[in-house]
Image: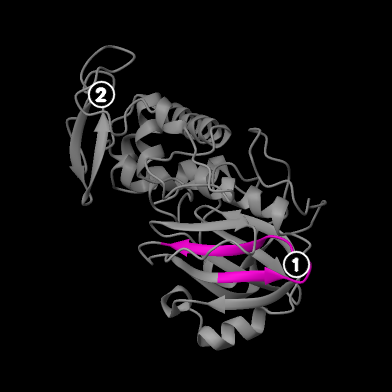
Amino acid sequence: MPELPEVETVRAGLERHVVGRTVADVQVLHPRVVRRDLAGPAGFAAAIAGRTVKRAERRGKYLWLALDDDEALLAHLGMSGQLLVGDPDRPLSPHVRARFTFTDGGSDLRFTDQRTFGHLMLCPLGGSDPPQTPPAHGGIRPPISPLGPGETRELPAPIAHIAPDPMEAAFDDGDFAARLTRRHTGVKRALLDQSLISGVGNIYADEALWRARLHWARPTETLKRGEVARLLGAVREVLSEALRAGGTSFDTLYVNVNGESGYFDRSLQAYGREGEPCSRCGTPIRRDAFMNRSSYSCPHCQPRPRRAHP
């Protein structure tokens, strides 16, 4: 599933190609793509036609186009969703689920989803973050709609409960550390909890834990302040590097709005490298079963704790 770098790469592309344009027509080509929109395919299409895109924003793995009248077109890419822009006359692929054309007659926007796990919905902008200050950690909060002192950032109501991601100004390191160490779970499981920290998935959790030299099953309640700081630093480092590389693409399912793949997979140190030597110590990388998926770690650099959470 796309994680923060992949979704931010798509958001940045939408910012360049879609913001400021007015929707002329919407075609819903598969009803499942709007299954969470109560208006249904026809109501969804009618409600968006004629609306102007004001901003392209993201939180964690969700992205949205802020429209006029304080509503948003919210998108989740699921396992294989893509938002692609291009020549409106190009042939429709069999996996296009929705198509948006614009009044200027330029490039269209297509939601393509081979596995149909992703979805689109129109929803109100309702939730908000606390007043913002620039991130001291040099984060990648989208440079659109800069907020002044005392201003708040509006969020689509359905995702207002999702925690800020570690690259946002709204992310509070101290609050995260306190909440993390109050939990009684494994540190990787906590990193995947979108109510605690958003945008981190299986790939980047493994990479950050490798960089921080922490085992994925380390009990969160045993983490010291310095270890939490080291982990957050590793998370931000790997997310930033992956973003500069356009994300991680193992196949053609993960692409930017122009259909181009990212190349961070060339920099992976742990994820997917079972049996390969650790680049730090040479010990073969180990794969363990984890939540119906896998966790990759170095047995030497990331020793399993004596007391571990599954």
Q: Is residue 243 above or below residue 113?
A: above
Query: Is residue 304 found left or right of 205 in the rendered image?
Result: left
Q: Is residue 232 above or below residue 200?
A: above
Q: Is residue 161 shown to the viewer in this render? A: no
Identify which residue is drawn at 77% across, 65% down.
Answer: 21
Q: Which residue is mark 1?
A: 105
Estimate the x, y position of residue 51 in percent, counting from the top left. Answer: 74, 75
Q: Which residue is mark 2?
A: 298
Identify which residue is drawn at 47% across, 34% down.
Answer: 235
Q: Residues within 10 Å of mark 2 (few under 14, many from 20)?
A: many
Secondary structure at badge 1 equals loop
Query: At label 2, which amino acid type do we have?
Result: Cys
Magenta stretch: residue 41 in it? no
Query: Is residue 229 found left or right of 71 in the rendered image?
Result: left
Q: Residues within 10 Å of mark 1 (few under 14, many from 20)?
A: few
What residue range appears in magenta? 99-113
Q: Looking at the rendering, in which quadrant would you find the C terminus?
A: top left
Q: Are marks 1 and 2 in contact (CB under 8 Å)?
A: no
Q: Nearer the viewer, residue 288 or 35?
A: 35
Cα separation, mark 1 vs mark 2, equals 53 Å
Name the main secondary structure of what is drawn in magenta. strand
Query: At label 1, which amino acid type do we have?
Result: Gly
